[in-house]
Image (spheres, rainbow, N blue to C red):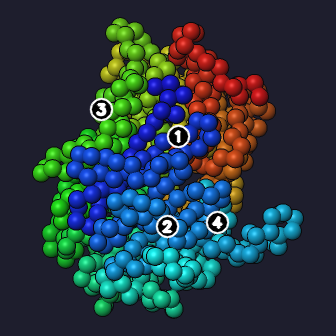
Amino acid sequence: MKPEAIWEMEYVGDVRLSPDGSKTAIVVVSLDREKNEYRSRIELVNGGTVKPFTRGDHRDSKPRWSKDGSTLAFVSHREEKGSQLYVMPADGGEPKRLAEFPEEIEDAAFSPDGKRIAFLARDQSESYTIEKPKDQPPRKIDRLIYRLDSVGWTIDRPRHLFVVDAEGKGEPVQITSGPNDTSGLSWSPDGKKLAFVSARHDTWDLDRKTDLYVVSAKGGEPTRITKTDSAHHSPSWSPDGSMIAVAWSPAPMDSPHHAQIAVVELATSKRRILTESLDRQCMPFGSMREPAWEGDDIYFTVEDAGRTHIHRVSSDGNEKPEPVVTGVLQVTAFDVTSETIAFVATKPALLPDLFVLDGDSPRRITKYGEAFASKTPLAEPIKFTAISADGSEVEAWCMKPTEFTEGKKYPMLLNIHGGPFTQYGDRFFDEFQVYAGAGYVVVYSNPRGSSGYSEAWGRAIRGPKAPDPGSGWGGVDYEDLMAVTDEALKRFEFIDGGRLGVMGGSYGGFMTSWMIGHTDRFKAACSERAVNNHLTMCWTSDIGPFFKSYFGPSYLEDPEEYLRMSPIRYVEKVHTPVLILHSENDLRCPISQAEELFTALRILEREVEFFRFPGESHELSRAGSPKHREERFRILLDWFDRHLGGRPADHKEKPEAAGR
């Protein structure tokens, strides 16, 4: 896979079944090279037939069925700005616009009788109608969480719940109000109420707790169901109306914890946790949907050792969760009816495609991943296990170069994931395929701190001064990654031990910066959107106060502990050539983190290059502009080619930005 191949990628992003399970609506994502934009279209699958429902000239997404299966609602971006909510007969016809917002319509759902649609969107203050910033009034900020990466300001544009007539009679009615965000939505079975989640207590920005609420579908004062004692997300009302399923976490400021699936009884507010026996993360990062009810059972996804599977659990808690969809894959979206389980899944050499469960075996319906693989040779990983310094077993993977020659030695790139409470594993990842396609051995792993394993594994890197202490960042996780490097060199003779590179983004960028301050084994590094100084990170990041949940004391209480765990403290020991990549609009790890590292290395006269991507957020490598994503690949490959000798000279391409 070459950098320009990202333009050829086409894959399934979401799936929703008609109520009787006979039809499936999917979202197919593609890229528009001419306009440097993402496109998505909705297609309908009926048996083995796949037909377009929308043309794909825009971004059409979030297909939602009416209860009788006659109509689909969806969100589109057919105007120059904002988004629009449409409905359209399931058998085709002209779409009818029900609502338009200057913001993204983030979720939608038909009422049980099909006469109304509830949706979520941000409600902007009047200042957003004033075009010139110099004419806008100042923002009043009185809470810590007032902006978010890839979203922007939230303090004066909270997300709220709206309801609109499904035939377009009248304007949308705002159901929730006030300065606090509303998230999640679910209709009661009788269509009279809506469930949602919000943080409306005075200290919500300090403790990060969220409550489950119920409000009349006509509006009015919401009723708080839970006791502000933990975090609730993604509500889903039971078919009999007696319970609401949620994703639940016990202590947002004591991280990390596995998200669990729970039910809350409306009559008593009693909460029942259903998934503790799994000891796994039951709401993976980036989950596309709420828990799904089918009768008395609840379906949800689970991270497990680099894979993401679908599980089922009885809502009464009398039976332990059981796997429904397993295998060497990661499920990224799913839906369920009494007749069918449909899901989107990806494998290391397969872009996300639509599958249905036939008996115990998944059957692939769409062939977008196959079409890409047929013209783009892809690498398959080899799984292996490394033994860390204290005897812990660390799961890891190795990809050979796509054009592999037996007996030849190749440079290696150690990749470190972000999070840290996320996981690498059995899914298509464009980065690994591009590096393997450029002649590199790609090694990646799930060191301690990762999700997908026991909660103790994830909590092993909590600060040493925190309750339930761990090693801190840069402790056992560093040992695990070095053990993976050693085991890869021992196990795979085709790796050239004199040409090792290391790279990662976000927490992976932190760990890259940390590693080169503690070892000279790597001949080149790329630190991307990294945390380099925990102390300054805490007062500049959109989630700065969150780090207390990992480290125990706040940065005000123990600044020295934050500096001890900061790569910038060890910068004088860095002799590895460093490439720094960062986005100028990154609010999660602000670009000042990159500037600190670059400035220090330049003063020390170390070899360093720094590329700043304008207009991009923390999500550059995943959801940035396609042209920037391609250019990022070229910069990375040029850097490692120069320092590790990856590709032959006749295969190299200079990045356009390389002398800017």
Mark 1 vs mark 3: give the one in front: 1
Distance Cα–Cα, label 3 vs label 4: 47 Å
Q: Residue furthest front?
A: 93
Q: Which residue is mark 2?
A: 96
The residue type indicated by label 1 comes to Leu
Kindly check if marks 3 and 4 are in contact, taking CB atoms under 8 A apart as contact: no
Q: Residue at x 71, y 43 (%)?
A: 614
Residue at disc 2, secondary structure: strand
Q: Quadrant of residue 233?
A: bottom left
Q: Which residue is mark 3?
A: 383
Mark 3 vs mark 4: give the one in front: 4
- Observer able to see residue 337: yes
Q: Residue at x 42, y 60 (%)?
A: 93
Residue 473, compared with residue 262, is above or below; it is above
Q: Residue furthest right?
A: 134
Q: How busy is the neighbourhood of tag 2: few (under 14 within 10 Å), some, or many (20 plus)?
A: some
The residue type indicated by label 3 comes to Lys
Q: Earlier in the sequence, mark 1 or mark 3?
A: 1
Q: How busy is the neighbourhood of tag 1: few (under 14 within 10 Å), some, or many (20 plus)?
A: some
The residue type indicated by label 4 comes to Pro
Q: Which residue is mark 1?
A: 31
The number of callouts visible is 4
Q: How busy is the neighbourhood of tag 3: few (under 14 within 10 Å), some, or many (20 plus)?
A: some
Q: Residue at x 38, y 14 (%)?
A: 404
Please indicate whether residue 130 sits to the left or right of residue 35 in the image. right
